[in-house]
């Protein structure tokens, strides 16, 4: 969601050398990104002074501090960067030379308490309390970063997120995972499926519904499913793949089975490239959702505990992406686990998701 700001910054400062500081685990997202000249990586356990030293070595003239954390501002202050721009926040304002005020349209995510959720879904509340005003499209997180870039002269006009996926890399990734075979079954359209969400179970549409939905879509489109997931989701990927194979009457020994389980088997860079090869991604609200949108792949996502208005896929209003919601009064709650009955997720039906995926492929 920072990439539109970086792209606008590049447009505003075409001759400027731009380096991105990022965690080493995320560096693959930025390979060959047209807005960047260099990537500076840090490790998870790296000390504050070590990171500041790395920044100091770059002899930068200015730092645009995208995170709101005290540490991110302290690092560039200790590094001695002359101009330091970021949002005004307690415990870090003294580190910034330019403190940017919050946007009037911006909203902060607030977790609801279990008691508040129960109150919201009670019959009395439903009948007596007015419905909250809809959240503006310009509340999206993309606009928060664009507003910061504006402080360095960049345009705040939105544009789609971008992760680079060059053709040569795509061909290599396809070959690595056996997706470019010449026999006709291998030329079936590739659809992606991501049933995990590391934040917590409140973000996850029920697993059995993913499997049933995937089978129905496969009947209608003759697609092959690529199942994605992180290292902690290997078992989840195996369960999904087994369910699809069983339902379709296939087995993994076939030359081109209708599902390939890639959960825990790809690097972050390979995930970017394989998502680009997919015609559509069916996913929970998750990192792969954002990556798919940024490489240009349409996304279908059931939203429950989180807000698509704040962190939905791609550019707000992009009709390529289908965001589904049960419209329950307790959502978004922003909790990791649902304290009641997961109605925000169970209220999204299989047929609704099937039609959304089919429509996304046709668009």
Image: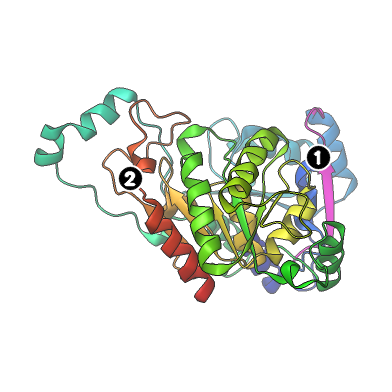
Label number found at residue 347:
2
Q: Position of residue 299 (x, y in %)?
A: 54, 61
Left or right for 82, reference 339: right
**31 or 106: nearer the eye?**
31
Callout 2: 10 Å neighbours few (<14), some, many (20+)? some
Percent x, y of residue 168: 86, 71
The front one of 256 and 314 is: 256
Q: Is residue 103 visible?
A: no
Residue at (51% x, 47% y) in the render:
210
Question: From the viewer's perspective, is residue 330 above or below residue 277?
Answer: above
Is residue 338 in sight in this rendering?
yes
Seen from the viewer's position, the closer of residues 28 and 262 is: 262
Helix, strand or loop for disc 2 = loop
Looking at this view, name the residue that lies furthest to the right.
Answer: 57
In the picture shown, does residue 8 fall above or below 52? below
Read off the residue under disc 1: 79
Residue numbers of the magenta segment: 35-47
Q: Quadrant of the N terminus?
A: bottom right
Q: Is residue 277 magenta?
A: no
Given residues 133 and 114, the one toward you in this image is 114
* Earlier sequence position, callout 1 versus callout 2: 1
- The residue at the point 29 percent across, 49 percent down is 327
Q: How many marks?
A: 2
The quadrant where residue 160 appears:
bottom right
What secondary structure characterizes most of the magenta part?
loop
Which marked residue is nearer to the observer: mark 1 or mark 2?
A: 2
Is 316 above or below relative to 128?
Answer: below
């Amino acid at each position: 969601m920072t990439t539109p700001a970086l792209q606008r910054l590049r447009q505003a400062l075409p001759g400027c050398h731009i380096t991105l500081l990022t965690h080493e685990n995320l560096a693959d997202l930025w390979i060959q990104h047209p807005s960047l000249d260099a990537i500076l990586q840090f490790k998870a356990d790296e000390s504050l002074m070590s990171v500041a030293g790395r920044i100091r070595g770059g002899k930068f003239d200015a730092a645009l501090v995208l995170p709101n954390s005290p540490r991110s501002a302290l690092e560039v202050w200790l590094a001695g960067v002359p101009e330091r721009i970021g949002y005004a926040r307690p415990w870090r304002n003294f580190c910034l030379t330019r403190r940017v005020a919050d946007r009037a349209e911006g909203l902060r995510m607030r977790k609801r308490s279990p008691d508040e959720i129960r109150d919201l879904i009670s019959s009395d509340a439903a009948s007596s309390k007015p419905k909250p005003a809809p959240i503006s499209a310009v509340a999206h997180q993309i606009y928060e970063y664009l507003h910061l870039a504006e402080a360095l002269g960049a345009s705040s006009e939105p544009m789609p997120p971008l992760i680079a996926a060059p053709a040569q890399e795509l061909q290599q990734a396809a070959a690595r995972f056996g997706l470019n075979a010449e026999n006709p079954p291998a030329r079936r359209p590739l659809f992606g499926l991501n049933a995990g969400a590391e934040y917590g179970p409140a973000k996850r549409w029920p697993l059995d519904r993913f499997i049933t939905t995937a089978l129905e879509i496969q009947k209608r489109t003759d697609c092959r499913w690529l199942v994605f997931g992180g290292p902690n989701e290997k078992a989840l990927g195996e369960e999904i793949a087994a369910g699809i194979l069983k339902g379709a009457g296939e087995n993994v020994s076939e030359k081109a089975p209708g599902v390939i389980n890639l959960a825990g088997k790809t690097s972050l860079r390979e995930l970017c490239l394989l998502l680009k090869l997919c015609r559509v991604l069916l996913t929970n609200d998750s990192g792969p959702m954002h990556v798919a949108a940024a490489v240009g792949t349409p996304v279908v996502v059931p939203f429950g505990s989180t807000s698509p208005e704040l962190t939905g896929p791609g550019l707000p209003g992009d009709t390529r992406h289908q965001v589904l919601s049960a419209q329950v009064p307790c959502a978004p709650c922003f909790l990791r686990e649902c304290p009641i009955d997961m109605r925000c997720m169970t209220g999204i039906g299989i047929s609704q998701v099937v039609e959304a995926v089919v429509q996304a492929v046709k668009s």
